[in-house]
Amino acid sequence: MLRQVQTWATINSGSRNLDGLARMAGQLADAFSILPGALRLIDPAPVDTVLPDGRIQTITHGQHLHLSVRPDAPVRLLMTGHMDTVFAADHPFQQQQWLEPGVLNGPGVADMKGGIAVMLAALTAIEASEAASRIGYDVIINSDEEVGSASSAALLKEAAAGKIAAFTYEPALPDGTLAGARAGSGNFSIIVTGRSAHAGRNPDEGRNALLAAADLALRLKAASGAGFSCNPAKIDGGGPNNVVPDHAILRVNFRPRTPEDELAVRALIDREVAEVARSHDVSLHLHGGFGRPPKPMDEKAERLFGLVRQCGADLGLAIGWRDTGGVCDGNNIAACGVPVVDTMGVRGGSIHSDAEFLLTDSLPERAQLSVLTLWRIAQGQYLQSAQDKTEGMTA
């Protein structure tokens, strides 16, 4: 597993590096070909973005890997990971180094090339066991998780259909803590169109789009509170000091904690956009949406976490979890009604920075945790716990 991680981490697979992603997809296709089933590389769905000048442009993403094994098996699972990293081809962080014995620093070693190695090792072990005939699974390794999974969202939704549970191989915290409930995430680009005028001769005839965008940013931020957070991240627009700007784009992110909070955010945006349009006499166009729905810890998720915790205890591992504001493909899977534990990968930390590290002893440790969990699901223990719960409530 360590050799795999180090080999894969030499390939820059930043989300926008299509050449690097193609190399990475080829490497992963070769590695996962040792498993039975139908493996294919799937072209990404088209995704639009708003350019700084307001034009809509289609962004190209890398291919996604899909492996389907025993789709007619009585127990079916979904396993997911991502091949992309946050480090672009021209980012200075490209090399690996040992910080100390057992601590490897490098781009993507924890997030999540280490996790992909753990997933592959676990599935290889299951295929060598008597449990293999009773369990089927789909593997999705997408190329755009770090930029929101917009080109793979439909693929994830399709693969989640009919699954009793899912596992995603994002890294756990250094102490092994998993992510429990997750907030959702919505990214919006709000295009503001005003009217240009001379800043000295006739400024009152202008309609300042930049000012309207700033007003909207302040209004949205002021409304955030217990149910959601708001981060106005950027305003594009403006021009010469002697011209009233007629164009601006506000980029803003929301993190709702529950589905009800997401509805509240949508109502807030509609209300404040209408108010800013009226008070500034400008027009506004909303682009974007909630690509990551909130992921609450419901009863099904708690039961799956309980199974993972018991498997950890039987291996001598203390497995705990805590809520987080971060998002991942686990959000999308949970929104399909499938319980998911989405931090089944390696222990590591400082991800999304040049200090990212992998604790290499967690490679076999986390692979064993996955194998035991998958084996017990194949034996019917997860389904039996659900049945016992239902019978207990009936009694």
Image (cartoon, helix red, strand yellow):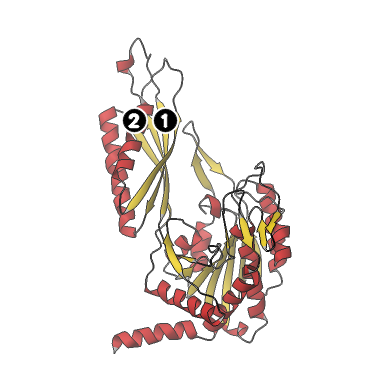
Q: Secondary structure at mark 1?
A: strand
Q: Earlier in the sequence, mark 1 or mark 2?
A: 2
Judge by depth and name the residue closer to the eye, 160 or 2. Answer: 2
Q: Residue at x 67, y 58 (%)?
A: 104
Q: Quadrant of the C terminus?
A: bottom left
Residue 42 in sight from this viewpoint = no
Q: Secondary structure at mark 2?
A: helix
Judging depth in this view, the residue of 377 and 320 nearest the camera is 320
Please give the residue where the numbered disc 2 appears in the rendered image. Answer: 212
Amino acid type indicated by mark 2: Ala
Q: Tag 2: Cα neighbours inside 10 Å, few (<14), some, or many (≥20)?
A: many
What crowding class fits label 1: few (fewer than 14 Cα within 10 Å), some (14-19), or many (20 or more)? many
Measuring from the top left, give residue 246's x and y in whole percent: 39, 24
The image shows residue 96, relative to residue 161, as above or below, that is above
x, y percentage for residue 257? Answer: 36, 57
User: Which residue shows up at 61% across the image and 51% down it?
Assistant: 355
Q: Disc 1 residue type? A: Ala
The location of residue 191, given as percent across then percent down, is 40, 35
Q: Which residue does the numbered mark 1 point to in the structure image? A: 248
